[in-house]
Amino acid sequence: MSPAFATLIGLAAIALWGLLALFTAASGAIPPFQMNAMCFLVGGLVGCVALARKPKAVRALVQPWPVWALGVGGLFGYHALYFGALRLAPPAEASLVAYLWPLLIVVFSGLLPGERLRAIHVAGALVGLCGVVVLSTGQGLAARPEHLPGYLLALAAALFWAGYSVLSRRVADVPTQVVAGFCLATAALSLAVHLAFETTVWPTGATQWLAILALGLGPVGAAFYAWDVGVKRGDIRLLGVASYAAPVISTLALVVAGFADPTPALALACALIVAGALVASSDKLFSGRRPNPSP
């Protein structure tokens, strides 16, 4: 698989994550860890169906414990920390802090063998971050000292996801099929937390059930398989910058579905994020160089 094609697959994950808010809004008031358990179960079962079609592929699940720790720690750890941040800080502010992970991916990628971090990549990531800041300003941002624990959890979530994404490059020889196991383990851990701390709320009506199914098939399912391919074999720096498009896609989807209204901030955020991606990739666009293949 060429790095360019792997990057396109990674971009598909970002597009799917852009639909997360829309499907979540349509799924009703289900507690977060219960939602996590249901959606990751669907995502894991989808991967198991693919494994069942090729019996030899089941061997992909037999991996050393560090690989499992990386995968389950990334998927479950990020969501657990993010949900905790939302409980201790306003959602808009916690989400903005958590969305430092694309910038962290760009910075951390410079530590990978065969990768070279340039100032232009960091500049592109910062421009993209400005787009997310612009998108968030209309949500009443007001940092308060009492929300510091929530901000710290959001920062930890960003570090977890950036670390998972970049370290996945170090285990590029591990087949993507193992993500099915990561999803099932994440579902089991989420269920345990749900039973311990949440009250079960079942979806009502076909629309909510379909929304949960769509989440499990897309943003909380196929997206993680696609992201695994992208960060292992694609241009991880470009994927990091392009990840800032997810909240913009999310807002656009909510506008189209009637859950939100279009604003000038949305248009400016789109322009900044596109500009950031162009800046980060300009060394390839104008020099004709190809991204370094995965080691």
Image (tube, helix red, strand yellow):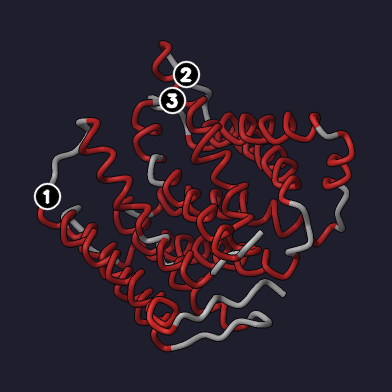
In the current view of this chain or complex, which residue is farthest to the bottom?
119
Q: Residues within 10 Å of mark 3 (few under 14, many from 20)?
A: many
Residue 45 image offset from top left, x and y in percent: 69, 30
**SS at mark 1?**
loop
Q: Residues within 10 Å of mark 2 (few under 14, many from 20)?
A: some
Residue occupying image coordinates x 71% and y 46%: 182
Residue occupying image coordinates x 87% and y 58%: 64
265 relative to 109, above or below = above
Query: Within the image, what quadrant is residue 52 found in?
Result: top right
Q: Is residue 1 left or right of residue 117?
A: right
Q: CA distance from mark 2 to mark 3?
A: 5 Å
The residue to which callout 1 is attached is: 263
72 relative to 144, above or below = above
Q: Is residue 87 left or right of residue 81?
A: left
The residue to which callout 2 is attached is: 209
**SS at mark 2?**
helix
The residue to which callout 3 is attached is: 211
Q: Where, quadrant-wise, is the N terminus in this rendering?
A: bottom right
> Going from the N terminus, do you reach mark 1 or mark 3 first?
3
Residue 197 image offset from top left, x and y in percent: 56, 36
Query: Within the image, what quadrant is residue 164 found in?
Result: bottom right
